[in-house]
Image: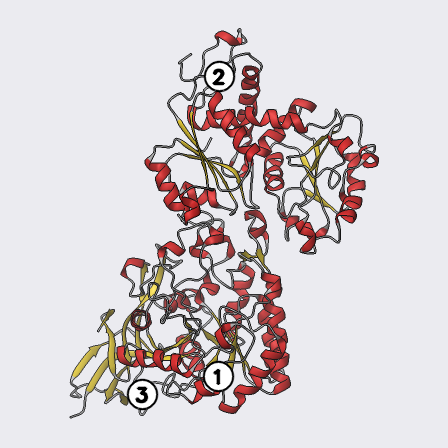
Amino acid sequence: MKRHLISAGDLSRDDALLILDTAEELARVSERSIKKLPTLRGRTVVNLFFEDSTRTRISFEAAAKRLSADVINFSAKGSSVSKGESLKDTALTLEAMGADAVVIRHAASGAPHRLATWVRGSVVNAGDGTHEHPTQALLDAFSMRRRLGRLEGLKVAIVGDVLHSRVARSNVLLLGTLGAEVTLVAPPTLLPVAVETWPCQVSYDLDAVLPKSDVVMMLRVQLERMNAAYFPSAREYSRRYGLDRARFGRLHDDAIVMHPGPMNRGMEISAEVADSPRSTITEQVANGVTVRMAVLYLLLGGSEPAIGTSAADPAVQTVPGGEL
Amino acid sequence: MSTTILITGARILGGGPRDILVRDGVVAEVGDLAGTAAGQTVEAGGLIALPGLVDLHTHLREPGREDAETVETGTQAAARGGYTAVHAMANTSPVADTAGVVEQVWRLGQEYGHCDVQPVGAVTSGLEGRQLAELGAMADSAARVRVFSDDGRCVSDAVLMRRALEYVKAFDGVVAQHAQEPRLTEGAQLNEGEVSARLGLTGWPAVAEEAIIARDCLLAAHVGSRLHVCHVSTAGSVEIIRWAKSKGWDVTAEVTPHHLLLTDSCAERSPLGPYNPIYKVNPPLRTAEDVRALREALADGTIDCVATDHAPHPVEDKETEWAAAAMGMIGLETALSVVQEAMVDTGLLDWAGVADRMSARPATIGRLPGHGRPIEPGAPANITLYDPSVRLPVDPSSMASRSRNTPYEGMALPGRVVATFLRGRPTVLEGKLV
């Protein structure tokens, strides 16, 4: 593992599998009544959120706390950042406080890369602009593997606003590394120029892609895109690219439906599809905590197995750091 | 009492060694002048002698952003880079859109004396793209403005552009267009292509430049005026300009040193890490294919000249996330080295070609009769002595510019300006400001 997790593309196949396998072990801890491990006791994790994202921040916070790290939540609103402090000065402040890891969410693509040049601790990208969201891709891969038992050869359709989606970018990179076959589906206006150079297939036709898909991942489509002429109307978008009951019926029986949230019910996904048993949407949230625990553990704790390798009773297994 | 300087052994435009005698600011004699008495002798064995360089595109930032650059520091940087004249862009604060502001900038240049400062006038008042600035008043002022540009912004309104092109005909002016279709480049951060797609940065498509250039060429032809295209950056723009020239239209174009050397991949992979805004510039760095086309176009004359677009910014405007950073890079002190690297050492241009593209043609476009003249008896002694044999790492801290935003930091570039003479007076000797 590298020191930071900024792009899903930085992960080798071995790195990615190590994170997923570690998460699998940590998931067992989450099933216990006492969910806390002492692994990161005395370490400080800063959640540096320049964009509102309650769900991602809470997920990272829960992950760090379950590993006994000290968590500092630093949100841009009401802080010195809103008074014009630069990202660099914020970074130097965190550095002076001794942050071991900084989890950053920022509206500017590349902000985590810049942060990493100014701090010594590990930087974890919790979403940067329209660039990447690697822990989302990891939790998506984790959720797919749990439901379908494998990733290799899995056919994954990612549908919606690919152009502005950090989730899509990270998923294309990670799923490619892990051997899944990704097809991006969107109107041509919502695909980046040069998308043909990405390691995936591209289609404008959702109906053609659905029957061949094992996983359909619907992306959030923001209504304001309509005003910038990316598509004519919400109704037309929904008709051509929304996952409604009729389209859902075209999926094969084992296929699953995913969404990174928050959803626009009735726009890219209908309520009955979102709430169906083949939707993993709430599991994704739970898996998010587990996967982020694995990421923080591996970046800060070391490369030893998180819970130990023996199949003994989890309650008495050794914990990395040896402090159980 | 006349002042004389004897420059010995210089290779004029890369030719055989010659001595140059300068008397009272004018080239007096060229040849084998051993034994000629002179007040000062400058040993120039092995050095290339070029006519003093002329920049059509410099941001001196004064008035308004003296924290980034001043007329004094900017012209010192110019002299260090071998320049004897620079065109100071109009996007200052206040904007150079009146005779008062252009005369102020021109006078500051005269006072400091490191190189001639030829102000560029704004095309529209306040660069706002609504109403023509008082172009005639600026042309008639002491600053004698001939080049007009809203650089930094595009004169995107077709009617306004047409009128500006027509109006400047009255005083042999030229409109230098920053070609950027504004709607196609809202929030644009980086060349639209593979790299911008991967980095998730809003794309700046080539078509936004090319569409404006095509329109402006047609407008210039229609009204029979002169158009100059600033910082051409794409292969498609080159094709359009080549076509316009083939029609005999009076269209000229410039390319920056950085567009001849760097590509958008710098934003993704560089020793400085990804997303380093030192590479953020407008128009953006393009692809290797564009770089190749720009070099060929400069070599065959489709692109007339090299212009630096020297754009100083203080550290705090670059040590930020990419989207928040200012656009632009400094270039006066590295331009000749970059041109040697991209054009001379690649065999695309000889030193006579460099003199043409960096001195003669920009002086002609800018209507500066005292600059860009061949080094021969009777010409003003604007001379640059350059040592092409060295290769040195670029050290921003040693630069004369007040700003440090060079994209070449740490990169080894060929060549070094040893001396610069402005009308016979050395402004730089031994690589140092006089």
Q: Is residue B410 above or below residue B125?
A: above
Q: Can residue B395 be seen in this snapshot? A: no
Task: Provide the secondary structure element on which disc 3 rests.
Answer: loop
Mark 3, residue position: B380
Q: Quadrant of the N terminus of chain B?
A: bottom left
Label 3 resides on the chain identified as B
Q: Quadrant of residue B30?
A: bottom left
Color scheme of the displayed model: secondary structure
Q: Relative to A242, say whether B109 is above or below.
A: below
> Under tag 2, what secondary structure?
loop
Of all chains, the one bearing label 1 is B
Q: Give coordinates of residue B139: x percent, y percent.
A: 44, 87
Name the residue beneath numbered marker 1: B134
Question: Which is in the foreground here, disc 1 or disc 3?
Answer: 1
Task: Find the residue positioned furthest to the front.
Answer: A78
Q: Position of residue B13 (x, y in %)?
A: 36, 79
